[in-house]
Image (spheres, rainbow, N blue to C red):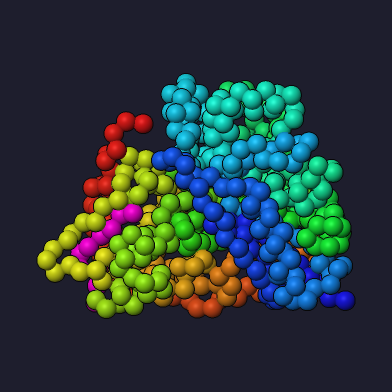
Amino acid sequence: MRTLIAAIDQGTTSTRCIVYSPDFVKLASAQREHRQSLPQPGWVEHDAAEILANTEAVVHDALAACDARPGEVAAVGVTNQRETFLLWDRRTGEPCAPAIVWQDSRSKGICAELRRSPRGDELAVRTGLPISTYFSGPKLAWLLRERADLRAAAERGELAFGTMETWLIWNLTGGVKGGAHVTDATNACRTFLVDLASGAWDQDLLGWMEIPASILPRIVANAEPGGWARTVADGPFCAEVPVCGAIGDQQAALVGQRCFEAGDAKNTYGTGCFLLWNTASELIRSSTGMLSTVAYQLPGESARFALEGSVAVAGSLIQWLRDQLRMIDSAPDVEALALSVPDHGDVHLVPAFSGLFAPHWRPDARGVICGLTHHSNRAHIARAAIEATAFQVREVLDAMQGDTGSALSSLRVDGGMAANDLLLQFQADLVGVPVERSGDLESTALGAATMAALAQDLCPSPADLRAARSTQRSFEPSLAADRVEARMRGWRKAVERSLNWVEGD
């Protein structure tokens, strides 16, 4: 009988299941998209019941694709879109409202109240996070303010709160029949409800936002020997299987890239960009606009920390060129179009479609295209779009090096845009260190599988995994320092022109 590891990757636009062998060879996968609901400007919602149904379907399809038999799956790991959350009824298992997505900005009023509070700065330090609509705590406070029926039910202890890994684990391990109500350390610390130093729910924050503690899950490590509970035999796995790994998607990519040592860093080029720098046992409080976050926590060990820089728009900018401007037929076409001109033609594109994330945190910014002349054409705009991602990553990396007081030796990369050679070469030129493209661009699922495998002693130690990590290609910096600085000056001028566009909160 084979030993298999299943990873469930619940993302912003779709849910996947990938089945691995214990040496992390990919054996099968399945994927299904879910609907994006935009009921009002600034609102983004998902149907949690649809996501659960899709999860069960992709697990079934992936196991069928590799002809898995009952009993062969030895461990299950879950990774998820962080910050997206829902409330559900503990008695019926039904969601009480749509899941509110991390991109949603309906909590801007509550965030403004937090900023005006005399303790606003203290709260940001305590959580390691800026006060932002990005995080689920203020959105949960908004929901309980708006829905008196939900507040009353929450205070009676009838509701459960969770981010998407919590929702899936609760259902996979029995649901109303005793499902485990847990959240892992990486997801918990992104709610704006946790004291990062202690790793516990912060009672002051709960009180300020009037959130009953009874609805919150238990915070656990990312890998649990034996699992938090076993999947029910009539579930999608058709056998009892330990659910023993859970980790937020960007921390999962850090683990999937085998960045287990202090100073290891990875960048994921997806819808947005997320750069994480492992600071190991040292919790660094950023002074440059970075997030302080839990990187991962192994069984019986203290949490490991990271600095994170979040870029809102990366791959979605290429989709915008395709869908809104109709400049290309498919996303991969952008590289060939950009290469049809020798350089950017002094065109800069700042994709601040809903403001700028790290290191600026400027919700008042909006997108601009600068430097246009009669010579400019769509190829220059395509090249500027690719380069915009690399410029934003360089800004984040500069900030992180300022916070850590150390220099990066190399940058590990993954995600869909990491297939773009032009992007990665320009990225290496800007950051001045080798950019190493991973042998597996689907690092989030690999990270979830790794946590599940570590929990069940199905794989080597983190140190051994790091030593064996694979690189598909390394891009070496080749642009002279004075030219790099000239390019950065042009970018900074463009960013300056994107600011102060939106007035008021």
- Where, quadrant-wise, is the N terminus in this rendering? bottom right
Q: Visible in this render: residue 425?
A: no
Q: Is residue 121 left or right of residue 497?
A: right
Residue 381 drawn at (x, y percent): 26, 65
Q: Nearer the viewer, residue 195 or 46?
A: 46
Image spot of residue 288 (x, y percent) = 42, 44
Q: Nearer the viewer, residue 344 or 412?
A: 344
Residue 86 in sight: yes
Q: Which residues are magenta?
A: 342-351
Query: Which residue is found at the position 65% from the left and 36% from the top?
Result: 96
Residue at (31%, 44%) from the top-left corner?
365
Q: Was residue 343 drawn as part of the magenta stretch in this picture? A: yes
* Residue displayed at 32% across by 39% down: 364
Main structural element of the magenta stretch: helix, strand or loop?
loop
Which residue lies at the image location 84% right of the left edge and 63% below the top edge?
238
Outermost residue, left side: 374
Residue closest to the far top: 118
* Quarter occupied by residue 458: bottom right
Q: Residue 222 location, x and y as percent?
A: 71, 52
Which is nearer the eye, 11 or 31?
Answer: 31
How many numbered badges does the structure rendering display? 0
Q: Residue 320: image x %, image y %?
A: 36, 60
- State the quadrant of the C terminus: top left
Magenta-drawn stretch contains 471: no
Camera-side residue of 269 and 109 = 109
